[in-house]
């Protein structure tokens, strides 16, 4: 075997995630589905799809869970009304008279599916499993989460340092700087160290 790089060309590839990142995105509601948690709590999953980067392709997605229990309904109802008002479908959701959560979501889904807007997705840092790196899951923000596409300039704001916009995992003790605010870097005594 010959070890040489002469004449060898490489095209650098970049990995594109299938999921929307936390922040402000133009997206449409791809689907709304009813589900029940293992505990039996009813909920709905709203899947958003961003614009595709290629013609005929699929855009990045984000999934948000809203609960439909008696206790959560007031909060979910408020957010649905805000969404319906912004998307111009308030009459449609006001006309739903379902007797249970599953029936409600079944009637709600076609009203919202395919509707596009500008959305604010908050982030939540998730601990990686078995030595894998942590990752961030995006879902609709709790407040100030939608505006029409023709709103100019955009009034939605995202701040990755705001705990409501980006929920981070606690920092391990070993990552916290010394209490006096100073830190020292290890100096290599190896003369082959390319950074010395």
Image: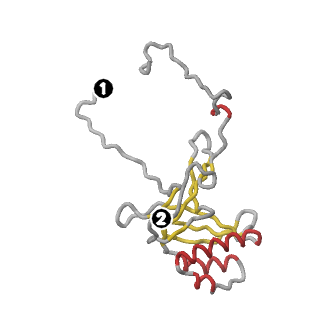
Q: Which is more N-terminal, label 1 or label 2?
A: 1
Residue shown at the point (64%, 84%) measured from the top left:
96
Camera-side residue: 72 or 178?
178
Residue 180 at x, y = what percent?
66, 27
Q: Residue at x 71, y 79 (%)?
A: 100
Q: Quadrant of residue 165?
A: bottom right
- Classify the position of the C terminus by image quarter: top left
Residue ranking furthest to the left: 7
- The residue positioned 46% from the left and 70% from the top of the image is 151
SS category of the residue bearing label 2: loop
Depth check: 52 or 36 in front?
52
Asked if residue 120 lies left or right of residue 78, the reply is left
Between 112 and 7, the one lying in front of the other is 112
- Residue visible at 39% across and 47% down in the picture: 14
Find disc 2 in the rendering and name its residue: 154
Please report contact status of discs 2 and 1: CB closer than 8 Å, yes or no: no
132 lies left or right of 69: left
- Residue occupied by mark 1: 3
Relative height, residue 162 to residue 118 (above, below):
above
């Amino acid at each position: 075997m010959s070890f040489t790089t002469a004449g060898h060309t490489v095209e650098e590839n970049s990995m594109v995630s299938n999921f929307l990142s936390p922040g402000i995105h133009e997206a449409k509601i791809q689907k709304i589905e009813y589900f029940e948690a293992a505990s039996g709590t009813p909920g709905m999953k709203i899947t958003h799809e961003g614009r595709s980067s290629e013609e005929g392709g699929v855009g990045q997605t984000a999934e948000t869970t809203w609960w439909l229990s008696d206790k959560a309904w007031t909060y979910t109802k408020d957010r649905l009304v805000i969404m319906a008002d912004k998307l111009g479908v308030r009459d449609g959701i006001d006309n739903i008279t379902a007797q249970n959560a599953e029936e409600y979501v079944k009637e709600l889904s076609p009203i919202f599916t395919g509707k596009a807007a500008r959305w604010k997705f908050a982030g939540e840092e998730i601990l990686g499993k078995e030595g894998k790196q942590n990752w961030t899951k995006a879902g609709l923000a709790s407040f100030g989460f939608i505006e029409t596409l023709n709103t100019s300039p955009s009034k939605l704001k995202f701040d990755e340092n705001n705990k409501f916009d980006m929920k981070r995992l606690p920092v391990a003790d070993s990552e916290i700087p010394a209490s006096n605010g100073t830190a020292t870097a290890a100096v290599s005594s190896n003369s082959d160290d390319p950074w010395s």
